[in-house]
């Protein structure tokens, strides 16, 4: 920090909600990105020159080579996200770079979008909306665009953390039967009456709808591949609102085409915003552009959580959501 400037210098890499930027510019010598220009790796390193901290998003990659080139002045990276696979934490630790994220504040919004994806997939929402918007709705038909009821369906949740548990509570209101697999079984008072399975392979044949709500790790990368799709019931529904790389796109697209998977509801994709174009031609794919946290309240809370972590660090305290 510049000793002649009482406020730490803060680079904000993307345009953030007004309330967040107002607080940031009040409390920091902040350099925002009002035009929301995408910042590449070389530009990112250059913009960090003279900065004490960065408030970034998942669109900026802090890999080992980028971290190695960061100026010595930079002490902290606060990512405006729960996920942190865009940051090499080992490299950050080796460099002495503090990293924080925003857990907890996305739970309700993401659970709501999970239910939206479940409903959208189960009720053929994409196909129905496409027929209407294309002017092809000629008359009511008893056998057209038939979805399936949620009542009585078995929902399998992979990853029973904050979001998974909140999805379970919402799904119970739809009279669904909840099953789950987690790295460890939850205490009985947090299971919400859900049936626990020791392995994903034990759960998959028992469920009608699979919801992926787990963190991304080497174990969950391409979790949903040909083999595990084969374990699902014929006509099962797949929902992913967690991380795109959980799904092997080639395998899921083939299963949607064949009918092995009845429908999918997807808010996240591998390589997003570039997605496999084959999804776009599938009437049984309900697709959203990663809007899980996209509410005014949640996006503000994410920014405030970033700033809470920054405030703590620059006041000599431990950031509450420190990762490195």
Image (cartoon, rainbow, N blue to C red):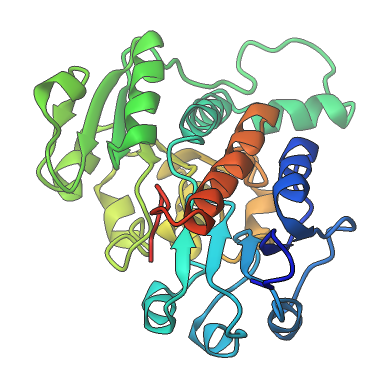
* Front-most of residues 245 and 35: 35
Residue 269 visible, this orientation: yes
Q: Residue at x 85, y 17 (%)?
A: 138
Q: Position of residue 178 (x, y in %)?
A: 26, 23
Q: Quadrant of the N terminus?
A: bottom right
Q: Residue at x 87, y 32 (%)?
A: 134
Residue 225 sits in which quadrant? bottom left
Quadrant of the rendering where the C terminus is positioned: bottom left
What x and y, as percent, mark residue 125?
64, 27
- Name above or below for residue 127 compared with residue 181: above
Quarter residue 109 falls in = top right
Q: Position of residue 219 (x, y in %)?
A: 27, 64
Quadrant for residue 34, please give it: bottom right
Q: In the image, what residue occupies the spot 46% across and 74% down?
A: 97
Q: Is residue 209 visible?
A: no
Q: Which residue sits at x=30%, y=38%? A: 161
165 and 305: which is toward the camera: 305
The answer to whether residue 256 is left or right of residue 58 is left
Q: Position of residue 164 (x, y in %)?
A: 34, 33
Depth check: give the residue in front, 279 or 22. Answer: 22
Residue placed furthest toward the front: 4
Q: As drawn, is 171 to the left or to the right of 81?
A: left
- In this figure, what is the number of numbered marks? 0
């Amino acid at each position: 920090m510049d000793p002649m400037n009482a406020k730490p210098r803060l680079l904000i890499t993307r345009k953030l909600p007004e309330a967040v930027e107002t607080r940031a510019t009040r409390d920091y010598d902040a350099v925002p990105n009002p035009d929301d220009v995408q910042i590449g790796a070389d530009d990112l390193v250059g913009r960090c020159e003279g900065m004490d901290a960065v408030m970034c998003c998942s669109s900026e990659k802090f890999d080992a080579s980028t971290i190695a080139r960061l100026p010595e002045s930079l002490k902290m990276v606060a990512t405006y996200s729960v996920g942190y696979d865009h940051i090499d934490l080992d490299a950050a630790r080796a460099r002495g770079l503090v990293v924080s994220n925003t857990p907890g504040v996305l739970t309700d919004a993401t659970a709501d979008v999970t239910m939206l994806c479940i409903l959208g997939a189960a009720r053929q929402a994409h196909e129905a909306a496409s027929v209407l918007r294309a002017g092809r709705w000629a008359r009511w038909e008893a056998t057209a665009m038939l979805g399936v009821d949620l009542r009585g369906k078995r929902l399998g949740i992979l990853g029973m953390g904050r979001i998974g548990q909140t999805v379970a509570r919402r799904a119970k209101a739809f009279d669904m039967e909840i099953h789950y697999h987690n790295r460890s079984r939850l205490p009985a008072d947090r299971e919400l009456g859900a049936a626990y399975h020791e392995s994903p392979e034990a759960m998959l044949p028992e469920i009608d709808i699979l919801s992926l709500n787990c963190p991304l790790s080497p174990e969950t990368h391409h979790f949903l591949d040909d083999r595990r799709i084969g374990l699902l019931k014929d006509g099962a529904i797949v929902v992913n609102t967690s991380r795109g790389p959980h799904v092997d796109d080639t395998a899921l697209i083939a299963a949607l085409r064949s009918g092995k998977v009845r429908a999918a509801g997807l808010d996240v994709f591998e390589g997003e915003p570039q997605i496999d174009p084959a999804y776009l031609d599938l009437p049984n794919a309900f697709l959203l552009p990663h809007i899980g946290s996209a509410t005014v309240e949640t996006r503000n809370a994410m920014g405030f959580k970033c700033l809470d972590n920054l405030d703590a660090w620059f006041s000599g305290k431990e950031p509450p959501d420190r990762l490195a």
